[in-house]
Image (tube, coloured by chain):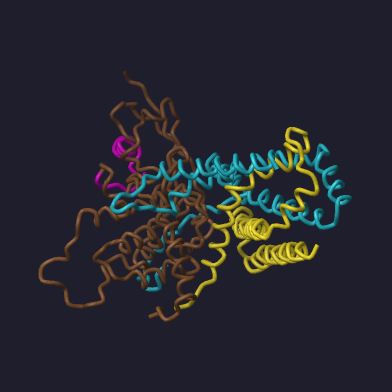
Chain colours: A yellow, B brown, C cyan
Amino acid sequence: MRRHIEPFWWALFSSGGTLAAFFLPVLIFIMGIAIPLGWIESPGYEKLFALVSNLHIRVFLFSLISLSLFHWAHRFRFTLYDGLQLKHLNRLIAVLCYGSAITGTLMTGYILIIFSSH
Amino acid sequence: MNEQITLEVLRYRPEESSKQIYQSYDVPFKKEWVILDALNYIKDELDGTLSYRWSCRMGVCGSCGMMVNGEPVLSCASFLETFHPGPIRIEPLENFPVVRDLVSEMSDFMEKLERVQPWLIRKDEDPPEGEYLQTPSQLMDYKNYSMCINCMLCYSACPVYGLEPSFLGPAAIALGQRYNLDSRDQGEKIRNAVLSEDDGIWQCTLVGECSAVCPKDVDPAAAIQRLKVSTTVDFFKSFLMPWQNR
Amino acid sequence: MPDNHEYIKYHPRWHRTPIPVFWWIQKWVYIKFILRELTSIAVMSFALVLLFHVRALIQGPQAYSDLTELLSTPISLILHSIALISLLYHSITWFSLAPKALTVRIGKWRIPDQLIIGMNMLAWIFISFVIGWLMVTM
């Protein structure tokens, strides 16, 4: 039996979609709208720095960011396929989408690892 | 009481023209008439050249599927009254080649149904004395998927099938899952190998229209999603517990 | 098509209708579908924004206050609002479709689809309030 890689991408897609659905709306609202508009007072640099220094928080942020990227990569790949009928560019699109997500994941990992040395 | 309603029927007669054209027919508007009754009236009284498939006229045989005002429906189960005052657009099922008028070519669908091996697969070849026993709750596990009448409305509603005709499609995958979930069956592994091929479940982007248009309330979208989950679990299991591969 | 076609003397000339490129604007359900799929762009963008937040924290207080300034510009507020609407749509559609993939059983009883959706939504609201409360009281 030939083994397909598709279940692997789908697992990343669906876990990313679930994390994004639970956590991103409130984070966007607080960090991108409520704090800039002054509805909520910003905790300030020191407290946020201490927060992200926490290992659990960094592991969580890594999962959230990386899986969100993979969620996008998988969904957007099919949006291009079906929405613009680009099936003939199948391979190129897959490489670009998943490649960007992998690059983003490496960057996230790097940034969160050097955070611990600060 | 002689109210009429207009049907605009998309016709295709390859011996006359390679193009499809709309032809209008005025038929009596009767409350108790379904679209199929109106088509039969046209065929009997107005234009004997109109071609369409039908058989049972009671939502069981699955042969009278067509597009009515852009939606795939069984013409025997759609009342004229719903579309009053008209005109009503009647077109052949979308995503299938048209043979003539409202008759679509379905051998692709038939081949796909066969491909999922929709029969009980047993490891032991000797059938039991009598029958395989099954409890009502085991029946409930797959009953929904066994209600399919092969009317192909789900294929017509599925943009993925339209774009990628090699896609195995909703009804065939739901039928495969129907046998997978049957307590008497032991062929899940064999069937899933077919269902998770490149033109199988992974093509699906969960538009969800297959389930929405099904006249028998089968839920092919759910069948496909659950297969994605179980195939994914098997995929990771085969890495974590490689000794289980056969 | 199966290969074992029998010979047909007068092969029917089938009519095929090509799918238009913009098939997804032809029906309301397809528009809703494509909008759902496009929410992934907002997911990806905000994931990167989160990453910029973390990077600014590393770079020091100056970089962080620069980022704060950038975030209060009208363009940023508009983009974040669009992202918020997209993500709300993503969350609602995601939880609504969850029962398609999940069947949860307690003994012989299968949890009804509506209950699975409801529990997901409640968990979502709960998580949002907890995070909001933590940020306010931090």
Q: In which quarter of the image is residue C116?
A: top left
The C terminus of chain B is located in which quarter? bottom left
Q: Quadrant of residue B186?
A: bottom left
Residue A98 or residue A21, whichever sits in front? A21
Q: What stretch of residues is rendered in magenta?
A: B36-56
Question: Is A114 drawn above or below residue C17 in the view shown?
Answer: below
Residue drawn at point x = 40 percent, y = 49 percent:
B153
Query: Quick check: can you spot residue B55?
Result: yes
Image coordinates of residue C3 in percent, x first then y, are 40, 73
Residue A118 or residue A100, whichever sits in front? A118
Q: Quadrant of residue A84?
A: bottom right
Left or right: residue C74 compared with residue B195: right
The N terminus of chain B is located in which quarter? top left
Question: Is B76 drawn above or below residue A60 in the view shown?
Answer: above
Image coordinates of residue B202 in percent, x first then y, are 50, 63
Image coordinates of residue C123 in percent, x first then y, are 51, 44
Question: Is C32 drawn above or below residue C105 in the view shown?
Answer: above
Residue drawn at point x = 47 percent, y = 69 percent:
B197
**Residue at the left extreme of this rendering:** B129
Left or right: residue A82 compared with residue B127: right
**Residue at the right extreme of this rendering:** C62
Question: Is B222 drawn above or below residue B237 in the view shown?
Answer: above
Query: Quick check: can you spot residue B15?
Result: no
Asked whether residue B42 is drawn in magenta, I would say: yes
Image coordinates of residue B238 in percent, x first then y, are 46, 75
Residue drawn at point x = 64 percent, y = 66 percent:
A94
Residue A37 or residue B43, whichever sits in front? A37
Asked whether residue C48 is drawn in magenta, I would say: no
Q: How many marks?
A: 0
Residue drawn at point x = 46 percent, y = 51 percent:
B16
